[in-house]
Every structure is written in structure tokens, then in C-alpha cells.
Image (tube, rainbow, N blue to C red):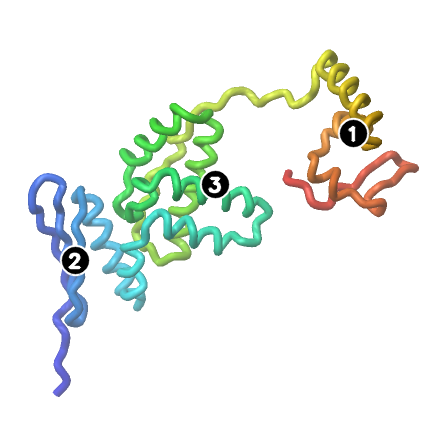
Amino acid sequence: MARRGRPNSGSIIERGAHQFCVRFSHGGRRESRTFETRLQAEQWLSGVKSGEEKGRLTKVIDARDLTLADALTRRLEICSEQKSNAEQTRQTRRLIENFPELTGKRLYEIDEIDILGFIEDREEEVANGTINRELSLISNTFNRARSRMHCVGLVNPIGPTTRLPEAKGRDHRLATDEREVLLRLADQVEALTSTPIGSIIRFAAETAMRKSEIARMTWQCVNLKCGTVLIPDSKN
């Protein structure tokens, strides 16, 4: 007669301050993890049981060890077709390299205190807008981990009130005196190098097109009769 495994079970044992050990048994296979808070331990146990009911126990258990760095990297693979992937790749690498204490932690261990500590460190170095973009990246990674990486029961530590207030948007238009000085210098360079830098600057100032958009222009995109330019691939 085939031997049956132990019935599915789970328990949480408090071993002292900031030590909550979770034990889970499924068909003779035992798993255990230690967490800093009871809430994290309960989330782990709840997620494992939910995964077991759906027949994905192994994948769910493996996902329990997924670090933020791992999830950030996997997210890039999932979102590889997005236009902003190149910038998000650079942003992801900066986070992983510069903040190993946060990105090296398992997703299920990261809570609001970790995020607040990250914000406090970043406030000394960069503007609120940059911090908000990094928070959005981390938040989206948690959501992707929950929906695409088998992180059942994972709680996103970044809420709508976590974002920081941002200053009013910058005015990207040149002031009159700035424009005059810039064009005067550009004309001098153009006379020496035969590069139409002054014309390029005038065109950019009048159309507000990005440098990359101007560089990708072809005659097929230009309608001289109507005075229009088609931008087929714009950031916005």
C-alpha cells in the first residue's frame, strides 16, 4: 500500500522579539521560514496554502525566496516591449547597484518601514520627482510579482499616499535673452565648422521637438506645402 504523506498543515512559532518561524507541511514535504513580524509570517503561510489549493505549490514556495532585485530583473523581461524599457533598464540597474540593502531583501520581507527608509536616503540626494519614479518602478514590480511571478498574497508596501509632492513643472522654453546668446554663439560655430547648428537650434526651439526626434526625421515625414512634420515615434 502506498504511503500517504502527512496532511497539509501550517503553524507560526514566536521565538522572541522579531522572530516568527513558519512551518508548513504538504504531502510529506516540509518548508520553514523566519520573519521579523507576525504579519509577514501570516502572509507567507496564507500564500503557500493558496498556491497549494491551485496546484502550484512548488512555484509559490519558490516565489517566497524572490528578492526585489530578482523581481526587478524579471519585470524588465516581462515589459521588454515597452517604449520606455531602455530608461527603466538604467533605473533598475541603479536601484540594484546602489541600494543592495533594500533590493537584496525578499519581497515578502519588505514593508512600509523599508520604503520610508529608502525615501529618507534618497531625499538627501535627488528631487521628489526622481524618487516618485523610483517608487513607481518598485510598486509596479510588486504588482507584477503578484500577477506574473506566483507571489500569492504579496502586499504592496507602496500606497497612493506614499508619493512625494513635486514642484511645478519646468518651463522648457528659452527666455528671449537666452535665445539671443545661444543663437549668436551657434552662428559663430556654424561659420567655423560649416555645421548648421544654428538652424538646428532654431528648428528645435520653434517645434519643441526632442533631439532624438529631429535626428530620426526623414523627408517622408516632412510636408513643406502644409508646413508640418510627422513624428511617428514620440516619447509622449
**Sequence-wise first label, 3 or 2:** 2
Label annotation for residue 91 = 3
Q: Residue at 32% x, 50% y: name it.
A: 67
Q: Nearer the viewer, residue 40 or 172?
A: 172
Q: Nearer the viewer, residue 113 or 123?
A: 123
Q: Residue at 35% x, 47% y: name it.
A: 68
Q: Quadrant of the C terminus?
A: top right
Observer-side mark, 2 or 1, equals: 1
- Across the whole image, how many numbered discs are drawn on residues? 3
Observer-side mark, 3 or 2, equals: 3
- Residue 82: x percent and y percent? 57, 49
Q: Amino acid at mark 1?
A: Ile
Is the residue marked by circle 1 packed among few (<14), some (14-19), or many (20+) residues within 10 Å? some
Q: Amino acid at mark 2?
A: Ser
Q: To which residue does mark 2 refer?
A: 32
Is the residue marked by circle 2 packed among few (<14), some (14-19), or many (20+) residues within 10 Å? some
Q: CA distance from mark 3 to mark 2?
A: 34 Å
178 versus 68 height, above or below: above
Observer-side mark, 3 or 1, equals: 1
- Residue 119: x percent and y percent? 36, 30
Q: Secondary structure at mark 2?
A: strand
Describe residue 104's horizontal placement relative to residue 36 as left or right.
right
Q: Residue at 37% x, 52% y: name it.
A: 70
Describe residue 53's horizontal placement relative to residue 132 as left or right.
left
Q: To which residue does mark 1 refer?
A: 197
**Sequence-wise first label, 3 or 1:** 3
Q: Secondary structure at mark 3?
A: helix
The image quadrant that residue 202 belongs to is top right
Is the residue marked by circle 3 packed among few (<14), some (14-19), or many (20+) residues within 10 Å? some
Describe residue 18's horizontal placement relative to residue 139 as left or right.
left
